[in-house]
Every structure is written in C-alpha cells, then in structure tokens.
Image: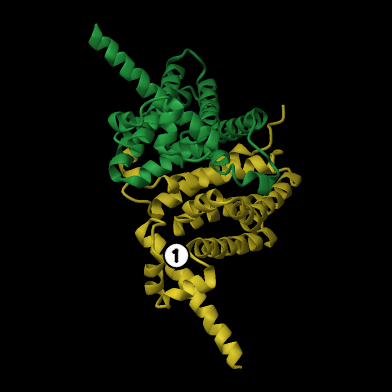
Chain colours: A green, B yellow
Amino acid sequence: MVEQLVRSRKGVARDRLLEATSQLLISRDTLEVSLAEIAAAADVNHGLVQYYFSGKEGLLLALLRRDAGAALDSLRKLVEFDLPPLKKLELHIRGVIRTYFRHPYINGLINLLQDSSPQNAAALANFFIKPLHEFQKRILTEARDAGLIRDVDPVLFYFSTIGACDHIFKSRRILPYAFDIRQIDTGLVRSYSDHVTKLILDGLRPERRA
Amino acid sequence: MVEQLVRSRKGVARDRLLEATSQLLISRDTLEVSLAEIAAAADVNHGLVQYYFSGKEGLLLALLRRDAGAALDSLRKLVEFDLPPLKKLELHIRGVIRTYFRHPYINGLINLLQDSSPQNAAALANFFIKPLHEFQKRILTEARDAGLIRDVDPVLFYFSTIGACDHIFKSRRILPYAFDIRQIDTGLVRSYSDHVTKLILDGLRPERRA
C-alpha cells in the first residue's frame, strides 16, 4: 500500500517533469532550456531529473517517447476504425500536421537525438519511425486493395508525406521574413492540412484507364 | 596590378576555405568541424577565417550563400528555358533533391542559421527562400495558365514540395535502423526523385471535368 503510493507519487513527479519540459519547450520555442528551469516549473527537486532520466538527453528522449506514444495510439485507433481507407489516409495526414502544430519541438528533438548517437537513432527508429511506417503501410495497402489508390512504395511515401507535413513548422523562424507570416495559427494549419491532403490523395489516384 | 593580384589571391583563399568547409562537412557528416581543421584542409592561415568571415557562423552563412547561389542560378536558367511548364516543374523538383543529395549539410545549416538569430533568419529568407519561392511561382503560373495544373497556393506549395524533397536526407541517420537502408546512393535518389515528381505532378493535375 505504502509502496504503491510511493510508486504513484514517483510516477506523478516523472509525468510532471515531462509536462513541464513540454510546456517550456513550447513557450520558449527552443531546446535550450536548463534542467534547473524545468525542475522549478515542475515544482520538483532538481536531483529527481537525474534520478528519473539520467540527465537532459534522457529527459528529452522520454518526452519524445511520450509524444510519439500518444500520436501512435491515435494512429492505431484510426487504422482499426471502420472508415473508408481514403478517409483514414486523410485523417492520418491531418493528424501528423496537428501533432507538429501542437508540439513544434518534435522536429528539433528528432534531429537532436538522431544526431546524438547511433543508440538514440536506433531507439527513435524502433519506438517511433517503424511503427508509424507500419501503420501507414496498412492504410496504403487497404486503399490500394480497394482500388482507390495506385501502387506506391511505402518507404518513399513515408518520407515524402512526413516531410510535406513538417516543413512549414521547422521553417517557422523564416516565415515572417520570407512570407510575411507572423505566426502559424489554426487558420494556416487548416489551409496547410487541406493543401497537403489534396496534394497527396490526388497524387496517389489510380492511373486513368485508357 | 599588384592590387589586382592581391585581390585575386584573396578571392582564391576565400573560395578555398568555402570548398574545404563543404568537403569536410560532407565527409564528416556533421557541422561540428573546427576552424583549425578547415584552415588546415584549405591550406590557409587560420587567422584568415576570422579575416574573411568573422568566425564560424559567418563562414557557414557564406557557404550556404554559395550553395544557394548555385542552386538559384540553375533554377533561373530552367525558368527561362524554352521547355514545357510541366517539364520545368519536374526538373525543378529533381534539382532540389539532387542539391540535398550533393550537399547533405544544407538542411543542418538552414536550421542552425535560422535558429541562431533573427538577422540570420532574415538574411536566409532574402538570399534563398524568397528567390526560390519566386521562381517556383513563375513555373506554377505558367503551368496553370496553360491549363496543365490546377490552382495552388504557391506558399503552401513551397513548404510541401521542399519538405517532401528534403525529409529523406535529414533522416539519413535513422535509415539503417528504420528501413535497413545503409546509405543514400544514386539509385535511391533516382527512385525518390521519380516518386516525389509523380506524387506532386499528379497531385496538381487539373480537376477532371464532369
């Protein structure tokens, strides 16, 4: 009973640290946030960051695992849902864009972690990229088997689609200077989602019969 | 005469430093290359890096200007060439992918510089993003006026297309773990170029008439 309570309080502190990190990364719009600031924002003893995550890299990796896990959960539900395959594809693309919009630090985290070590790159591939790719493959296969899209290599599809979804977010610091866009708001996210879904769904239409 | 010679030798040293930087960034596949290593590779006095570029950030910015300039020169020629608009669009997309393949550090440089200061982000927008976008707009307008593509917002097109082109390169450290791809070779670049051009060109086809 006491042990359970201790475990659950430990879980709470860990979750609070992750959520505080997420909020700080969003509000500061940089990964340059100190552990002291994170601990203070979470109202948790500084030393616990070391205890739970063995330092900042571990904390960032855990945050990405958390966010990736949430995104993959939604995608799993979508794949299993009873919906027309093209609707699934559309909702998947809109979901990826929404994830980047809500967690604009994801891109930076992925870059940082894949560059930091082969171990982190492999971990990232296993807990995020491979499952995401597998779900996409299932949607693509379903749509192709129903004759709704042409044949497409799911690996190439993965890169072109995710790249199309994420680029506007990773370019956010250039937007004011290049396109007079002050910030990415929900209106722009809607237009961008409409644009990308139409581009990709039309781009995958089956060949016209002669 | 002597002054001309000095100017030209200065130009040579500056170009050598840029080329040495480019080569080192490619062979090491990281931006973590020291000024001493660059100066040694260029066989140029260390102090000249400071003299020409006021430090590493200036050197990296100059390298991106050089590479962006070359890419924009090709694109300008392509836009002015007497070719069918869809062929221009296809060659443009293939050219973007080829640029990322030959200079895989471009992405990292863009991220680093846009994050380093609003001044660098503004410079980047002015010497690279805006002209690139303007050229794309001309190709899109030409193709649409000829009835070959539907109407598309050129700003949204910019992000989706550039993102689709670059994502496989910025993910290169994950490829072995996620997709069992050891490295990006010319065969993969060809498949990826075919995939992205087809996706985008088909994605922009005019609406079918009822």
x then y, percent, for residue B67: 54, 63
Give the answer, above or below, for where A98 lies relative to B88.
Answer: above
x then y, percent, for residue B18: 48, 69
Instruction: Point out the residue furthest to the top here.
Output: A1
Q: Residue at x 60, y 89 (%)?
A: B3
Q: Secondary structure at mark 1?
A: helix
Q: Do we see residue A156 in this rendering? A: no
Q: Is residue A171 left or right of residue B192?
A: right
Q: Amino acid at mark 1?
A: Ser
Say which chain tag 1 marks.
Answer: B
Query: In this figure, which residue is indicated by the disc labeled 1?
Result: B22
Q: How many marks?
A: 1
Q: Residue at x 59, y 39 (%)?
A: B202
Which image quarter holds the C terminus of chain A? top right
Give the answer, above or below, for where B149 lies relative to B25.
Answer: above
x then y, percent, for residue B191: 44, 47
x then y, percent, for residue A139: 45, 25
Q: Nearer the viewer, residue B118 or A95?
A: B118
Q: Nearer the viewer, residue B52 or B71?
A: B52
Q: Is residue A32 left or right of residue B148?
A: left
* Mark 1 neighbour density, 10 Å: few (under 14) some (14–19) many (20 or more): many
Q: Residue at x 50, y 57 (%)?
A: B99
